[in-house]
Image: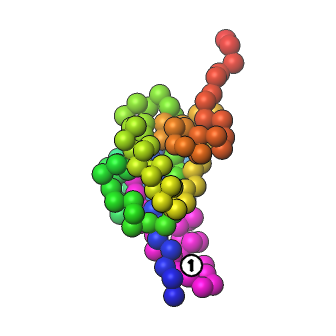
Amino acid sequence: MHTVKILIVTDGGGGYQRPTAIPPPGSTAFHLGEFVQVLQDTDWVGFNLQITKAHRRNPPGAGADVVDLRFDTHDLSQYDEILLFAIERDETVANRATAAEVQAISNFMDAGGGVFATGDHEDLGAGLCREIPRVRNMRRWYYAPAPA
């Protein structure tokens, strides 16, 4: 049976823990544990999934398999798909995808790899996703606040 290899990536306050309670008000934690669990628990027809959980940094308790991920130094050819769940804003310079990383992701797509990228409202996720070819045109990654 074919195995589809997926790299799931998050940043900032993101992680892979499963919630045990409702987060307290003001919490910045964004965890994908429930999402990953659903993918793993689903009986896929004709293929299996192999999931690698990655984080752009190394926050405590994130639950990532790969930390401090850089797309230009990590071997992307081992994956079929990359799922980007970016939450950091564009102003977070330390987390922006570099030109070399954008090129690595572009090369991955040109070689047949699939990329899913999402952010939240305003410019959340823009730091990582807004320059990636094809991805940059899927949504409005720029946010201009209303004049005061």
User: Looking at the rendering, which quadrant does residue 146 occupy?
Assistant: top right
Q: Which residue is mark 1?
A: 41
User: Looking at the rendering, which quadrant does residue 79 occupy?
Assistant: bottom left
Q: Which residues are magenta?
A: 33-55
Is 129 above or below relative to 110?
above
**Which residue is rendered at x = 34% and y = 60% of the image?**
75
The residue carrying pointer 1 sits among few (fewer than 14), some (14 to 19) or many (20 or more) residues within 10 Å by Cα, namely: few
Specify the quadrant that holds the C terminus. top right
Is 31 above or below relative to 26?
below
**Which residue is rendered at x = 59% and y = 45% of the image?**
135
Q: Decide if residue 79 is on the left or right side of residue 129.
A: left
Q: Decide if residue 6 is on the left or right side of residue 61.
A: right
Report if residue 132 lies within the magenta region: no
Q: Position of residue 35 (x, y in %)?
A: 57, 64
Q: Nearer the viewer, residue 60 or 40?
A: 40
Is 119 above or below relative to 51?
above
Is 47 above or below relative to 5?
below
Q: Amino acid at mark 1?
A: Asp
Q: Position of residue 4 (x, y in %)?
A: 50, 74
Report if residue 36 lies within the magenta region: yes
Disc tally is 1
SS category of the residue bearing label 1 = helix
Whether residue 95 is visible here, answered yes or no, is no
Q: Residue furthest top?
A: 148
**Which residue is rendered at x = 53% and y = 51% of the image?**
85
Q: Nearer the viewer, residue 60 or 54?
A: 54
**Which residue is rendered at x = 48% and y = 60% of the image?**
111
Whether residue 122 is visible here, answered yes or no, is yes
